[in-house]
Image (cartoon, rainbow, N blue to C red):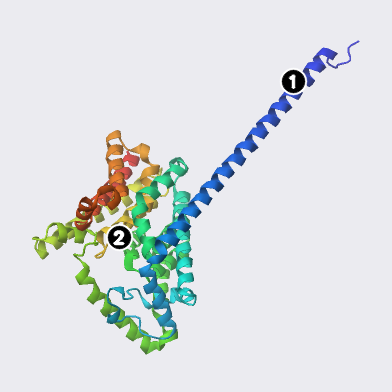
Amino acid sequence: MGTGLPSAPIRLTLRAGLWYSEADSMAGLTEHFVKAKKKKAVRFALILAAGVVLAGAYIFLIRRDMTDFGVCYQGGERIIQGETLYREADGHLQFKYSPAAALFFTPLSLLPYEAAKAVWFILELAFLAGIIHLADRMLPAAGKRGPWIIALTLLIELKFLGRELELGQVNLLILFILTLMLYSLIHGKEDRAGLLWGGSLFFKPYALVFLPYLLLKRRFRTLLTGAGMVVAGLLLPAIFYGLRGDVAVFQEWSASLSKSTAPLLASYDNASLYGFLLKTFPALSLEIGRAVLLAVFLALALAVLWMMRAGRASPAIQNPEILEAAFLLVLIPVFSPLGWNYNYLYSILAVILLLSAWQHSSPAGQALLGLNFVLIGTSLIELWGRSLFRFYTRQALVVLNFLVVLAFLAYLRARRRA
């Protein structure tokens, strides 16, 4: 009579198969854990190595300078004591930001200067990490190609980042604020975006490049919140100066900016488009120079309008604001009257975006863009030699590199739309 159970040989075979299956699973699981452990070890080793390099760079190179941070530190000290911020006696090291920016530095000014420098250096690295993290989160999943994009971006931007850290400047802070503003806009957090936009204006007026953009995007709530933030920034210094003193210190700020800007327009380090025209074509009349600047400005403004229109016409493009914002951020050093070389770190988002969309360019386009990135990343006196490097820097030729970057951002919009 049949029992309904498999015969003994069949049962043995099934048990053996089950044992082998379990053994394979255990082996696979063990291999997975080993690989994960190796990845963690490699990641830890890389982080440790980066920490050692950065600590060494700070100890032996950066902390000996940080001149611009020293100006901000002094501004924080002065505003606490109710002293004037803007003094001609400070010369080139005169505080140039708004009184509200001095308030930002008051906590650091309570620390010993050397400790404050170390804290600011760490904060700048945190701002850079935040920028890259937010950029990665805003990219579409199809555009993410692993850590090599971050590594290449840092290599391309290393010259600008190094100088930013060496001076202890505030551009990484501003770029972090603006990147977080963009992230907030994409996720519908208009109030937070407005507070960030308005707050960035305390340091430098760079965020004004987003003013017409936000108007055209009808982000009126963002603009209103931002305006409120600006008003708060105008009133806060009255805590230390009183209302009359607050008005007086803002008048001093305006006067100091008008006096200190003009003599620097044709200086060696000015790498803006206006600086390029002044230094490369010194015989150009003032009227013609301004006409050329205006023509380029209008052409790029039309490019932004076209990209916004293309973004609306192509719903398949995820978060078109990323590309538009990357374009606007590059415009900051290009059109800023005093666009120093290191200000081109505002191109970080553009570089990440172009590298992540590398496959969308033709082979010829990839070669041109790659060569352009190599020129940007290797333009160091140690690699090019003193004569070539000085010529490149003195003539502000870096602006041409970033006009190419702008052209590729526009091309990327057209390519994705096709």
Q: Is residue 288 visible?
A: yes
Give the residue type at disc 1.
Answer: Gly
Give the residue type at disc 2.
Answer: Ile
Q: Which residue is mark 1?
A: 17
Give x and y (percent) for residue 364.
27, 35
- Which numbered dot is residue 169? none
Give x and y (percent) for residue 346.
35, 57
In the rendered image, which quarter contains the N terminus? top right
Q: Which residue is mark 2?
A: 332
In the rendered image, which quarter contains the C terminus? top left
Graded by Cα atoms within 10 Å as few (under 14), some (14 to 19) or many (20 or more), the crowding at tag 1 reads: few
User: Looking at this rendering, what residue extends furthest in the top direction?
Assistant: 1
Give x and y (percent) for residue 11.
82, 17
Q: Quadrant of residue 21?
A: top right
Q: Is residue 185 visible?
A: no
Give x and y (percent) for residue 118.
47, 66
Up-down relation of residue 1 to residue 164 (above or below): above
The residue under the point 46% across, 57% down is: 56
Q: Secondary structure at mark 1?
A: helix
The residue under the point 54% across, 47% down is: 45
3D distance between C-alphas at marks 2 and 1:
67 Å
Q: Earlier in the sequence, mark 2 or mark 1?
A: 1
Q: Is 284 situated left or right of 186 in this image?
A: left
User: Looking at this rendering, what residue extends furthest in the front direction?
Assistant: 60
Up-down relation of residue 21 to residue 198 (above or below): above
The residue under the point 67% across, 34% down is: 30
Up-down relation of residue 36 to residue 221 (above or below): above
Between residue 188 and residue 169, name the one nearer to us.
Answer: 169
Between residue 104 and residue 353, name the one nearer to us.
Answer: 104
Q: Secondary structure at mark 2?
A: helix
